[in-house]
Image (spheres, rainbow, N blue to C red):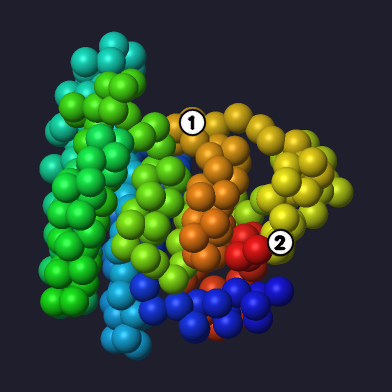
Amino acid sequence: MSNEISKVLDKARKIVIKIGSNTLAKEDGTQNTEFMQNIARQCGDLIKQGKQIVLVSSGAQVAGVSTTKEWARKKDVHYRQALCSIGQVELMHQWRKAFQQQNLHIGQLLLTKDDFENEHRSLNIRNTLFTLVDEGVVPIINENDSVSFDEIKIGDNDDLSALTAILWSADLLILFSDIDGIYSDNPKVNKDATLIEYVKSIPELRASITIGEANSFGTGGIETKIQAAEKTTIYGIPLLLANGSRENVLENLVNGSLNGTLFLVE
């Protein structure tokens, strides 16, 4: 199956990579800047090979906690939004430093659901993405958490990355999380659970697995990743779910030495 992943990556020119909060956070909840530098290096290698990369990066709240530790336990929505406001600056600062080491510039887009539903705004997003990547700049997208409320909130970055992949007409969406892929059952509970390496039918997948809840730092879970795949595969965009914490994860996916769950276009 890893050869299939390798083939899909080799064929894809326009790739959206989503990095989840749990991948960006250390065990103590602070930013994993070493991981960010490693991902930037691997993205740089892909760009040298002629690929175009768009990053969808979670982690504003994680970065906010790293910066303003005394707010970490506050649950009030206003504090959480303020924490994201502080954290977004630190998040982009670390990404800028990471990509600067690869002689690459980054651009920031903070979006809400309303931006995708408004025809003029969505066209502006699309044009901005095309301009940035054509000029060798790496766009980094996140939800605008500081101004989002339920009516305009996308909800999680699995969904945001799917919307981005569709709008940009990507060839592949990669979701990096803290899990190796989708299993037949919860591998933490059931030792006999097996990794589902590829999915041809999402309805059949839903009927065959147990879907758990979201984890500590992120807002999504397996369900949001399946929903993202439902969106992208309709538009002919395969989705790959893999463990972002694996060493040199992009390189090893490209060379076929690492597995994940690949949602194939039906």
Instruction: Name which residue type carries label 2.
Output: Lys
Q: In which quarter of the image is residue 44?
A: bottom left
Quadrant location, the N terminus: bottom right
Asked if one can make out residue 19 in the rendered structure from this viewpoint, the answer is: no
- The percent position of residue 52, horizontal first and vertical second, equals 30, 75
The local crowd at label 2, few if under 14, some if 14 to 19, many if 20 or more residues have their Cα within 10 Å, is few
Q: Going from the N terminus, do you reach mark 1 or mark 2 first?
A: 2
Side of 212 where 106 appears, left or right:
left
Element class at badge 1: loop
Closest to the observer: 78 or 14?
A: 14
CA gap, disc 1 and disc 2? 30 Å
Instruction: Name the residue tied to disc 1.
Output: 216
Where residue 197 appears, x then y in whole percent? 71, 63
Give x and y (percent) for residue 65: 27, 31
Q: Does residue 116 appear anywhere in the picture?
A: yes
Q: Which amino acid does label 1 sit on?
A: Ser
Quarter-of-image position of residue 149: top left
On residue 200, which mark appears? Answer: 2
The mark tally for this picture is 2
Question: Which residue is painted at 60% across and 74% down in the image?
Answer: 5
> What label sits on residue 148 in the rendered view?
none
